[in-house]
Amino acid sequence: MKTYLYLSLIPEALVASMLPPDEFGSYYAIGSAKRSRGQAIFFSVDRDQLSTDFFPLGDIDDRCVPHADGSPKTSIYLSIYRTLEHIPTSALLKLHLATEDGRVLTLSPQPYEATSDAQIHLFQEFCPVSPRIVSRLDPQEFTDFITNPAQPVNVPRIVFCDLTLGALHDDPSSRDIDDLPYPNLGHLRDCLRELIAGPVKPTKTVMRQMTQDVLFRTVEHGFYVGDAQSLVSFPMPSKDRLEREYYAWWRSALSTFGH
């Protein structure tokens, strides 16, 4: 059996498994006697691009073997600290989004291209930190900003997605908010108003860390992973494509949260 490597974002960890992505996503989301049920977001990782100086890969094929009954080894944790920064962006082959009931959507990488001329963005960071922020910066500018070592607060590499603001993009006071299932919308409005009123400040924190799963239906354009050298995007399919080509996953992504 083949050994796969995955970079989990919730929580951050490098995991070896004999399960292919769809089966691993189902296992990781639905849970077992040892772990709780919940959404899973993880990358397939190119093992050949990883440094054996940081990751214990030398004996992984000896450790990741079937159980005595022939069933595959589901997971071996190889790293749980400062993992993302030691994995080149080029080694992140695919991004997999697993719903709470274990259905998996796989996204392919592509070079970043600006997809919106919006003046304000809502970003959810995943790894290595997880605040939710509003920003005047687009994904490329935000990546450059947060990975710049000259900034007082910075990270070597970042994974995040952009979330829809709906009508609040243009008017923080809009009452057309039926499609925005975010907690504490009043605080989000205040953050948007403060950012608009103070043109010097590039970002404003909405939540200091994730307090719930991200609703996949609120992801606006996709997921991003970048550092000071590069930015790669993993675009979400359009709603029309999700309904036509990935209906089972899309239905699960909606129904899991009661929508």
Image (spheres, rainbow, N blue to C red):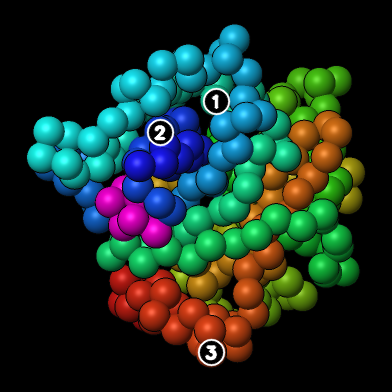
Most foreground residue, 140 or 152: 140
User: Residue sitting at 53 percent across and 45 percent down?
Assistant: 44
Most foreground residue, 155 or 93: 93
Q: Position of residue 15 (x, y in %)?
A: 41, 33
From the image, which quarter does the C terminus lie in?
bottom left
Dot 1 falls on a residue whose secondary structure is loop
Mark 1 or mark 2, whichever is nearer to me:
2
Callout 1: few (<14), some (14-19), or many (20+) C-alpha neighbours within 10 Å?
some
Q: Which residues are magenta?
A: 22-29
Question: Callout 2, which amino acid?
Answer: Ala
Q: Which mark is residue 244?
A: 3
User: Residue sitting at 39 percent across and 25 percent down?
Assistant: 61
Callout 2: few (<14), some (14-19), or many (20+) C-alpha neighbours within 10 Å?
many
Residue 193 lies left or right of residue 22; in this view the side is right
As measured in the structure, the alpha-carbon distance from the residue carrying label 1 to the one carrying label 2 is: 13 Å
Q: Which mark is residue 16?
A: 2
